[in-house]
Structures are given as structure tokens and as C-alpha cells.
Amino acid sequence: MEKKNVVYFLTLDDIKDENILYNQIYANEKSNFYVSNDLSKDFYIHQALYGFISTSATIEDEFYLVPEIQFEYAILDFENLHISKKVKKLLDKNEFEFRINTNLSLVLDNISKFHKTNWLEPQYKELILSLKDYTHPNIDFKIFSVELYDKNTKELIAGEIGYKINSTYTSLTGFSSNNKNYNNWGKLQLVLLSFYLEKENFSFWNLGHPYMQYKFDLGAITYSRKDFLKRWLEKALL
């Protein structure tokens, strides 16, 4: 691997090389971020398969994917799901419509509007959209758009993008309306997604970085990289 601006440049060959992957990437406890200019579907799916979670960045006017093999991960096992009283009230009111994969473009647009400065750059959006209906010949990978609508107005209130790999689901990024009328709808979307994943027999939910309190409020537990990979690779590499 070529060292570039303190982080390593990552190629598809690097990911497919078990010696590099296990002994130089997984075992490297000082590095977590990598960069790549490979925007192919195959690269993106393989980096996701092996436990990286990719964001993106523009460096010196050039766009890069930024795959991260995290030091720690937040994992939700569905039996640990916690539902707050406020979310229970929203569930009882039943004024929402929960959908999966009906309008990826709308979810992406709302994420960009909600996060004024974010890593979801146009090239990344294009890559996600190109993966929407793509079927990899060897890997069970699928992009997800998770959508929560107001049943009465049909407005999209909260949502996220992520992906499934075999029986695992990984969250990438999401949004929730700032309108006070929709307080706790973001948490409602998470709970409904958990219901869906459990019903569809997913093994667990990878929530990514374990630095946000809402993930622990939901019932997630922190896993070290080593412990995460032990669980992850058993399910992802079926």
C-alpha cells in the first residue's frame, strides 16, 4: 500500500489480499482511515464486505472515498432494543408510514439539506444511486433507503441510507425533520427499522461509530475492532 498524506491509499487488490487485510489493516491499531479513488461498484461492495464504512472527501480538488476500519463499532442485537415512552406514544398514535426502498433519491436529497456540511458529496450520491438496483455476482449486497412519512401529509419526515450484506445491516447516514411537530420521529424511524430488520431475520445492526448517545439509548453495545470483526466476518463472509 502507498502511504499518502498520513493515511494509506487503498486498492481493491489490497482488500482481496488476506495478508494485507488481516496483518496490515486489521492488525494496525494506529490507523483507521484510508483513501481510494476507485469509484467502482466492486470496490465499494468489497470494502463494505470486509468491515470498512466509507465516507468521502475532496482533497486538493480530487474526490476520494474514505473507507474506515473503525477502532470501535456500535452494534444492536434486537433483543436489546429499548423503546422510550415518547416513541411508544408515537407508535400508539400510528400517524406514520414506514417504507423501505421506495424513494432513495428523496432520502439522499433530504440528508444533504439537513446536513449543510457533510461527506455525502455528489460523486458519493451517484455511486449510491448506481448501486440501487445492482446485483453483485458473488456478494449479497443491497443499498437500503429507510423512509418515515407523515401519514396525513405524505411528507418525508425522517430517513436514512445503509446497506445489507448477507444477514447484516449497516447504517451510513440519515436525517430527521427539525420541525417541533415531529419531535422524536427520528427515534421512531430507528425503532421501526429495528422491528423490520428483526422481522426479516437480520443477525444484527451495525450502527457504526459508538460516539452518539442515541445509539446507546436504542440499546446498542460498543464492540472493539477485534470483537466486531469476529462477529462481522462470521456473518458477512457466508
Image (cartoon, helix red, strand yellow):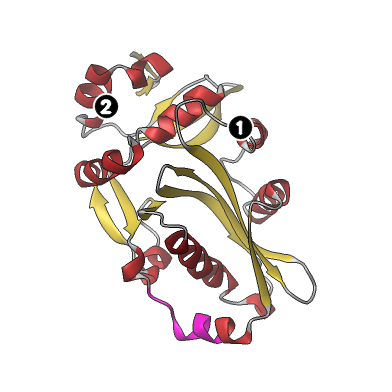
Residue 193, percent across and down?
51, 63
In the image, taking residue 116 as reference, residue 164 lies left or right, namely left
Residue at 25% across / 52% down in the picture? 223
Type of the residue with mark 2: Ile
| Spot occupied by residue 186 in the image (x, y as percentages of width and height) | 56, 68
Measured as percent of width and height from the top left, residue 58 is found at 57, 28
Q: Which mark is residue 134?
A: 1
Q: Does residue 11 show up? A: no
**Badge count:** 2
Instruction: Report the mark closest to the observer, 1 or 2.
Output: 1
Circle 1 packing at 10 Å, graded few (<14), some (14-19), many (20+), is few
Q: Residue at x 61, y 59 (%)?
A: 159
Q: Which secondary structure, mark 1? A: loop
Q: CA distance from mark 1 to mark 2?
A: 28 Å
Range covered by the magenta-colored residues: 82-89
Residue 61's disc is none
Residue closest to the far right: 153
